[in-house]
Image: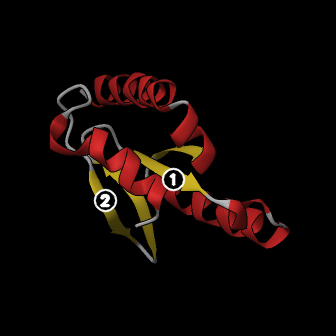
Amino acid sequence: MTEAEKHLWKRLRGKQIGGLQFYRQKIIGNYIVDFFCPKASLVIELDGGQHYTDDGILRDAERDRYLKTQGLQILRFSDRDVFINTEGVLKQILAQACLQSREAL
């Protein structure tokens, strides 16, 4: 796990966000996603510098297309956002997770 992933995982693990279970480094198809909440069908990806290159953007778009075909919603945050705006990132995750989990009912 990257430092940003470790930082966010401290706040996601143990059902700390809306009582929802998140898993880290979850295999979905041919991909390993950073975090996954099955109840909300939500994938969270943290993007470091390599994600902002032309190749990285193309790979992420391909991954996102596949994940969406599996009925999953994807939230992406930069590593920088995770460190400087942790609470804002968590609020976005909670809002999307609550929305997705209600739609699943």
Q: Nearer the viewer, residue 98 or 78?
A: 78
Q: Earlier in the sequence, mark 1 or mark 2?
A: 2
Q: What SS does tag 2 mark?
A: strand
- Mark 1–mark 2 distance (CA, rounded to whole Å): 10 Å
Residue 33 appears left or right of 10: right
* Image point (37%, 30%), residue name: 100
The extreme right residue here reads 54
Is disc 1 placed on a helix, strand or loop? strand
Front-lying residue, 32 or 41: 32
Left or right position of 75 against 16: right
Question: Quadrant of residue 37 in the image?
Answer: top left
Task: Say which mark, if any, is on residue 24.
Answer: 2
Q: Which mark is residue 1?
A: none
Residue at 21 percent of width and 32 percent of height: 16
- From the viewer's side, name the closer residue of 67 and 33: 33
Please report the residue visible at 32 percent of the width from the left and 49 percent of the height from the top: 9
Q: Position of residue 46 (x, y in %)?
A: 53, 53
Up-down: is 99 above or below 37? above
- The amino acid type, in three-letter code, at marker 2 is Arg
Above or below, 31 relative to 83: below
Q: Which residue is mark 1?
A: 45
Q: Position of residue 70 (x, y in %)?
A: 44, 56
Q: Amino acid at mark 1?
A: Glu
